Amino acid sequence: MNNFKITGSIIQAYLVCPRQAWLMSRKISGNQSNISIEIGRIIDENTYLREKKEIRFGSNIFDMVKNEDGKIKIIEVKKSSKMIESAKMQILYYLYITNFDAEAEIRIPKEKKIIKVFMDEINREKIEITLKNIEELLIKEKAPTPVMLKYCKTCSYFEFCWAWFLGVYMKETIYIFSNGRLKRKDNTLFFESEEGVKKYIPVENVKEMLVFGEIDINKRVLEFLSQKEIMLSYFSYYGYYMGTFYPREHYNSGYMILRQAESYSDLKKRLFIAKQFVNGAIENSLKIMKYYNRRDKDLVKEISEMEDISDKIFNSESVENLMAHEGQSKQVYYQCFNKIINNDDFKFEARTRRPPKDCINAMISFSNSMIYNYCLKEIYETHLDPRIGYLHSTNFRRFTLNLDVAEIFKPVIGDRTIFSCINKRIITEKDFEMNLNGIVMNEKGRRKFLEQLEEHSTQTIKHKKLNRNVSYRRLIRMELYKLEKHFLEEEEYNPFVMDWWWNVYNIILWC
Ligand code: SF4
């Protein structure tokens, strides 16, 4: 028997869509900024202010309970009568569980309607049958598969169920390079640089903030960012990632975290997911190598070595062994950079980090930290816990899942931006500086690179399978939804790999 509690909201959801009820029972919440939820919240906050008294009864919350001449009345407030039948069942359930001589009514302030609901033998039977059906649904290990309903369009789970149908982002990533002070002002964000330049940042359009300058920030701003669910990451003077202000998770689901953790502690399950990440990284790197090979770059030897490593991936018996293969694949892949890059000012010898020893390494390091950050931001928009990674061990590091997912997207977004910047001479030697025996990108270089990276990652392209446009950033989110579905055992996880036509089309476009 399971512990998933039936509530009035679950009953209402069940009558609209059983899948929604199953997800709710696992505390997998829908998108809280969904317009229907928002309207419901506004109605809730602005109606019956004097009468309003929410009462908790077990796991249920009644909108209002009144005592009218010694008779108890349970009241539910709804935003419209569109789903009145399911709303009636919800309130009938409240009458059923309270089991006292009560009345019930549904109020729809927008339509100026009051609908009375009574418990009688027919309704009692209806509710008992519904409860039995819901119990049978909730004990199922898997959620029912999504079925496109009229209601889906306005459902807060739309993105989760139908991610494949979604396209572009409207919000922006805000980069702050100047030194100054970030404030909360007039209910939005306000930045004042040391030079006295003042700028309002409309908070509703902010997706995330990446800070490269020295900024002063106070608790009010952090509270505001938290409230608006805006992640803020900060980087050192040299562009090294330092940390992230990760607001309280808004899509918290204990059930999903347990499933995620279970897939980590079971070595077989963990290895499966880790292999998929490495496989995705290698396949995408191979696509790029094959593209340039067809453009007379002679990468035949490297491609063959990479394919050999790719075959070994699925035979790895431990994550350490897998990591070793992944390391070899990176070496082979990076050897191709000198052949792919068409600019004598840039030479690559070997991958070096902390500090990078040449300009290409400096760009790779910077680009990778940006991709890690993109992935972290997208994880924040799902029910996944960024601390549980599969390829990168969950240890003292704060976030690891973003490092895993980034493996798939580093070649697709980051490396291709590097080739584009160098081959098109957008970035030159002047965009770097020496530091602590190594080389880093200077501020001008970082600005130029981020401009290109932002342009590439938000570019929308036609997705063959979906037959619609999606951005690369959206692809990262889709990858995470695929992982969630894997944890829910709805669909085995397969990494995103560029199609050949996609590959050709986009490399031509970028390089
Ligand atoms: S989006 Fe559609 S299928 Fe998914 S939970 Fe909502 S109503 Fe059900």
Image: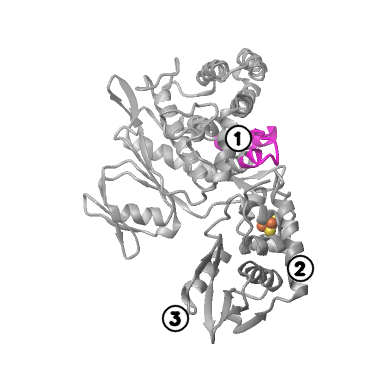
Quadrant of residue 480 within the rendered picture: top right
Identify residue for label 2.
Answer: 126
* Three-letter amino acid code at the position of disc 1: Ile
Mark before the other along the chain sequence, 3 or 2 = 3
- In front: 280, or 224? 224
Q: Does the residue at mark 1 contact the one at mark 3 (Cβ under 8 Å)? A: no
Q: Where is residue 339 in the image (x, y as percent from the top left)?
A: 53, 19
- In front: 392, or 162? 392
Circle 1 or circle 2, nearest the eye = 2
Secondary structure beneath disc 2? helix
Mark before the other along the chain sequence, 1 or 3 = 3
* Magenta part of the chain: 484-511
Look at 39% across and 30% down and name the residue there. 428
* Three-letter amino acid code at the position of disc 2: Lys
Look at 63% across and 51% down and name the residue there. 4
Q: Which quarter holds ligand 1?
A: bottom right
Q: Where is residue 360 in the image (x, y as percent from the top left)?
A: 43, 24
Question: Crowdedness of circle 2 by 10 Å Cα count: few (<14), some, many (20+)?
Answer: some
- Taking the image as shown, residue 147 lies to the left or right of residue 367, namely right
